[in-house]
Amino acid sequence: MILRWLKLQNIRSYLEEEIVFPEGSVLLSGDIGSGKTTILLAIEFALFGFNKNDLTGDSLLRHGKHEGNIELCFDIEQKKIVVKRFLRRSNAVKQEQGYIMINNERIDCTAVELKTKILELLGYPLSLVSKSRDILFRYTVYTPQDAMKMILQEDKEYRLETLRKLFNLDKYKKVRENLQIVIKDYKTHKQLYEQQVEYLFEKQSLLQQYIVKKSNLVSDIVVLKKKLKEITDIIQLQNKAVEECLLIINEQKRLANEIAVEKEKLNNLHSLIKKDKQHIQETSQQLTELEKKKKEIKIEKITKKSKDEIITEIKRDEAELMQIKEQLIKLQQQQEFAEKRLLYADSEIGKYKQQIVVFSKKKERKDTLQKNIEQKEQLQDEIAAREQMLQKLLLQLSEVETTAAIIQTSIDNIKALNKCFTCLQTITDDYKEKAALDAEQKKKELLERKEILLQQKTKNQKSFGELQERMKQLLIDEREYILLNQEIRQLEEKTALLHEKEKEVMQIERERKEIKILIEQIFNGEVLYEKIIENNKLLELVRKYEQSLQELQLISAMITEKQVFVSKINELLQQYEKQEKDLHLFIEQKQLLIKDIDKLNSEFLEKRKLLEKMIIDEKTVSSELTKQTTEAQFLDKDIERINKEIEDKNKIKEKIAAVNNLINWFSDKFTPLTVLLEKQIMLTIYREFNECFITWFTTLMDDESVTIRLDEDFTPIIHQNGYDTSFEYLSGGEKTAVALAYRLALNKVVNDYVSSVMTKDIIILDEPTEGFSYEQLDKMKDVLDQINVKQVIIVSHEAKIESFVQNIIRLNKSGHVSKVVS
């Protein structure tokens, strides 16, 4: 990684500045407070964003500014990287969305996304994304002033923990911590497994009991099955005997039923024969009566007209009469409607006459209002003229008051004035008094003028008010005129309607007379009505004639029908008598086949009783067999379930053994292995670190009375004049030398062991010579020559350092604004 340039806008003491970083050694030179540290903080912020411990928005954004930004350009493996972050102040200073450009390809990112991409580019672990401090950058590239002394003064545990993080060795500690969690989890599982394998012996004993019980049940089931088969065989034999007996009984019953049916048929035949003989007798009597009635019927034709002709004539006359009635009803309705129209027209005429009475008065009022309205334009001109006059008076009054105020001010100024502003001569009291009197005279004239203007203003305002009142009244009259005009127009329309209504009344009177004449003409339909009555009487006589004729025809048909009926009944009687003989013969034959039914029934009941007893025995044995079989099935399921439980518990026992092995391996082998690995790596690091630390310290402190080394906790052990000395008791220059040597040694070892980092080509030294003597400053040149990096950025206010570096960036602060001095 090589820095190329840095752009700042509203960052601390910088308004807008660009700093270009060349390769080689670069010195940021300037007085205390000139903005050197700001550049280093800006570089760190551009890369990693806020650090809640010592790099916040309030510490970066310039006071009084609401927005700022930092843009940093650097190279990594021939890639040009530009990263830009934005700051905005609201309630607090916050980071806005920024961007990163990789070979001119821009990617907009949030603050966290930017940090993630920078860590990937620098080869730093991504676990640092969630960390507030970027320790790899802080201890390898840029360590703020006095920060390295702090790590030397901290307790050894904190120092070792920091070094583990730097060398990515804290992963071993995390592994051990995670192992403890895993072991605890395994132990919990083991306890659960142990709870699950409880009562294993009891389950095995219960299984044996169930097996013995099932064996006994199987023996009982075999005996019951044998007994059930014997009973079933007996039931089959007995059932067959009962069925045979039942067949015989059913056959006897069938014969008895057939005999009963045939006897019933015989009885029915007797009834039919008796009934038919009675029918013959009744029909003969009816024939005699019908012949007698036929002779009594007399037929005489009244008219030559047919029934249809009479009906047609009646319908025609009725239709004509109906038409006359409809015409009469229609005329009566027309007469009634004409009466209603006449009443309504008279009512409307009365209303119109009442309204027309006020017509002349409204017309006179309209003419009066029209004359008043014609004065509106003249009145508007007068109001406009008065208003213009008032505005003119107000303007004059304002000018008079302003002039009077100016004169009063000049009077006061004259009284207070001692010298002339133009010629600078002394002004006498006589001159001031004369000038004041002249001004007072002018003021008096202006006040008199003001009084006259006020009187004119009052008079004009009064006149203006009167004109406005007249205008208001005129507007009221104008509205009234519009309404009257509408009313008069409506009254004129109603006058025209009145004439139309009067014409309508005359027309209705004519219609009434015409309707009355038509009604009188219609009342000549009495002759037609009498004709209809005569035709109806004639129709009734014709209908009676036709009815008598039909009755005679019906009686003749009935006589023929009765004669045919008697003939058929005689034929049926002959058939019934033959069937009666056949039935008597059939019944005698069937009665010979019937046996003793009572004896058969007794034998059947005895066999059925024995069968029912055997069926009950079968059900009892079958029920017991089902019960025993079901119990055996349940026992099978219980045995299967317990076998499964025992099998599962045995598997769990195997799991317990496996978990025990894992717990023992993690505790006894793997955990000690991580400790050993960490110690071996730390020992290797320690050796190189100690060697580099001694080398750098010897370079900086050419004093044989002071020697230094690191103990196994990476704590500096200082020997001075043969005695151990604490870091706190060293001089300022010696402390700086120890801290710088520690820093340079740490930088080299980290760059050697953490191969993925891309910041090996740069180091930033913040005030590395604080407290150095003149001779120690010379040693700093040797240090710079020996640091094998492409870019070294040094912050120092020591003038002598300028002779050691290849490039100098001079900074100056003026008026709270820092600038790069060319």
Image (cartoon, rainbow, N blue to C red):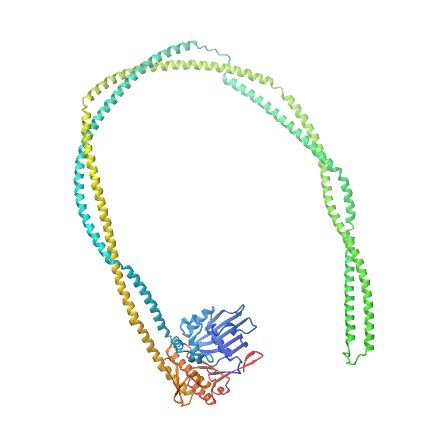
Q: Position of residue 680 (x, y in %)?
A: 32, 78
Q: Residue at x 27, y 67 (%)?
A: 661
The N terminus - image quarter: bottom left
Q: Position of residue 768 (x, y in %)?
A: 46, 83
Check the image and report above or below for 204 versus 792. above
Picture quadrant where residue 64 is located: bottom right
Q: Is residue 42 left or right of residue 416?
A: left
> Would residue 76 be visible to someone looking at this image?
no
How many marks are shown on the rendered structure? 0
Check the image and report above or below for 166 versus 290. below
Closer-to-camera residue (436/287): 436
Check the image and report above or below for 282 versus 613. above
> Would residue 600 be visible to someone looking at this image?
yes
Closer-to-camera residue (382/785): 785
Q: Is residue 478 left or right of residue 257?
A: right
Q: Residue at x 54, y 16 (%)?
A: 535
Q: Position of residue 387 (x, y in %)?
A: 77, 58
Q: Position of residue 630 (x, y in %)?
A: 23, 46
The C terminus - image quarter: bottom right
Q: Is residue 791 left or right of residue 594?
A: right
